[in-house]
């Protein structure tokens, strides 16, 4: 019985709360309309646009990646003259524009790439195992071919296959 009284008291409180909520009138807020001011002149309009856009960052077109090719580490005295020629060739073509390279320079690059690959193959047949020296020689051959013939050339693709 005490329980029924307690539940009925709670129900009465709930009904009063619901009546109070439903009995209130909701206040509707009307939006305040501000008149749009006409610009005095075209110059004023432009300056407002410039003011509004002033905080936006200016888009800067990304620059092409301009990192030097990897340098070949020293590979022993027997390959020293070949690596000196390779470094001199890379230094020459790296500074020049691809379109300005003459045929003699491209032919030098092709010959150098072939010599680097031949040296790597000779080294592989003598040592009968793969060493970092062979990798660097083949990589250097591919880089020389890339500068001599271009990235899309078949010769460069052949050197890349060896890597």
Image (spheres, grey):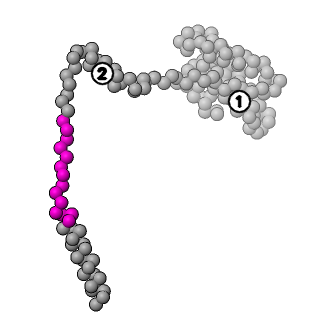
The secondary structure type at the circle numbered 1 is: helix
Magenta stretch containing residue 51, yes or no? no
Q: Residue at x 34, y 22 (%)?
A: 51
Reply above or below: 152 against 103: below
Q: Residue at x 27, y 86 (%)?
A: 4
Q: Quadrant of the C terminus?
A: top right
Of 22 and 44, which appears nearest the observer?
Answer: 22
**Residue 155 appearing in the image:** no
* Residue under label 2: 48
29 left or right of 133 in image:
left
130 left or right of 156 in image:
right
> Are the residues flagged by discs 1 and 2 in contact, CB closer than 8 Å?
no
Q: Position of residue 132 (x, y in %)?
A: 74, 34
Distance (Cα) linking label 1 and label 2: 60 Å
Q: Position of residue 120 (x, y in %)?
A: 73, 29
Residue segment shown in magenta = 20-33
Residue projecting furthest to the bottom = 1
């Amino acid at each position: 019985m005490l329980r029924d009284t307690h539940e009925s008291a709670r129900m009465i409180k709930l009904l009063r709360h619901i009546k109070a909520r439903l009995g209130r009138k909701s206040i509707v807020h009307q939006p305040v309309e501000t008149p749009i001011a006409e610009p005095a002149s075209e110059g004023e309009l432009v300056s407002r646009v410039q003011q509004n856009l002033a905080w936006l960052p200016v888009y800067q077109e990304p620059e092409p990646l301009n990192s030097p090719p990897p340098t070949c580490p020293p590979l022993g005295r027997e390959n020293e003259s070949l690596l000196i020629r390779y470094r001199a060739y890379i230094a020459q073509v790296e500074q020049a524009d691809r379109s300005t390279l003459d045929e003699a320079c491209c032919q030098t690059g092709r010959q150098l790439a072939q010599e680097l690959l031949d040296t790597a193959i000779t080294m592989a047949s003598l040592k009968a195992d793969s060493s970092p020296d062979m990798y660097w020689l083949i990589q250097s051959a591919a880089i020389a071919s890339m500068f001599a013939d271009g990235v899309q050339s078949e010769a460069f693709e052949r050197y890349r296959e060896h890597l």
